[in-house]
Amino acid sequence: MRKNILTALGFALVLLAGGPSQAANMGFMADQAMSRFTDQDAELFNQAAGKALMGKEGTEINWSNPATGAFGTLTPYPDPEKNADCRVIHMVNIAENVKSAGYYRFCKSADGTWPPVMPPRKSPAK
């Protein structure tokens, strides 16, 4: 069963402190590969996103779901605006033959969650 868009786009659930972050402003993802994720795809993606947010910058994190064929990569980069509590994640996802990619900025909240925030004004240095 598919989740609704805000639930399925659970990378807003990128949860390092155990609680979900805000799923606000995620409507732009409606035509992306993530909108085709199954519950299991979203769970695997969220696990990879958590690793990417806490991982070494430039280290690609891969995820895949052999049951559905969905897969992707997440690569963390430092925040181009030099905010130590923020990271930019380059995401590439494929689900149901739809590929989407982009850079997304997350900043750690006081409660330990990583909600998405406005995109960076400039691309991260690779």
Image: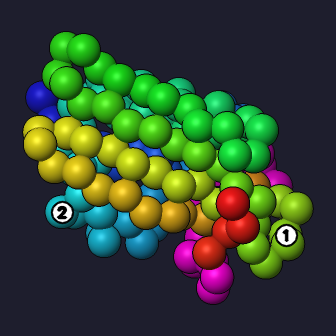
The x, y position of residue 60, in whole percent, is: 59, 37
Residue shown at 17% from the left, 22% from the top? 68
Relative placement, left or right, of 62 versus 99 is: right
The x, y position of residue 57, in whole percent, is: 75, 46
Relative placement, left or right, of 26 versus 97 is: right
Relative placement, left or right, of 78 versus 68 is: right
Depth order, front residue of 94/83: 94
Q: Is residue 36 above or below residue 24?
A: above
Q: How is the image coloured?
A: rainbow
Element type where label 1 sits in the image: loop
Q: What residue type is labelled 2?
A: Asp
- Which of the 4 image quadrants contains residue 43? top left
Q: Does the magenta stretch include residue 112?
A: yes
Relative placement, left or right, of 53 versus 37 is: right
Q: Which amino acid does label 1 sit on?
A: Asn
Residue shown at 38% from the left, 37% from the top? 72
Q: Can residue 7 be seen in this view?
A: no
Q: What span is colored magenta in the figure?
A: 110-122
- Which of the 4 image quadrants contains residue 3? top left
Q: In this view, does 63 lie above or below 73?
A: above
Counting other residues with Cα less than 10 Å from the Cα at mark 1, is it few (<14), some (14-19), or many (20 or more)? Answer: few
> Mark 2 near mark 1, Cβ–Cβ under 8 Å?
no
Q: Mark 2 points at which residue?
A: 31
Element type where label 2 sits in the image: loop
The x, y position of residue 123, in whole percent, is: 62, 75
Q: Mark 1 points at which residue?
A: 83
Residue shown at 20% from the left, 39% from the top? 95
Q: Residue furthest bottom?
A: 121
Q: Can residue 104 be seen in this view?
A: yes
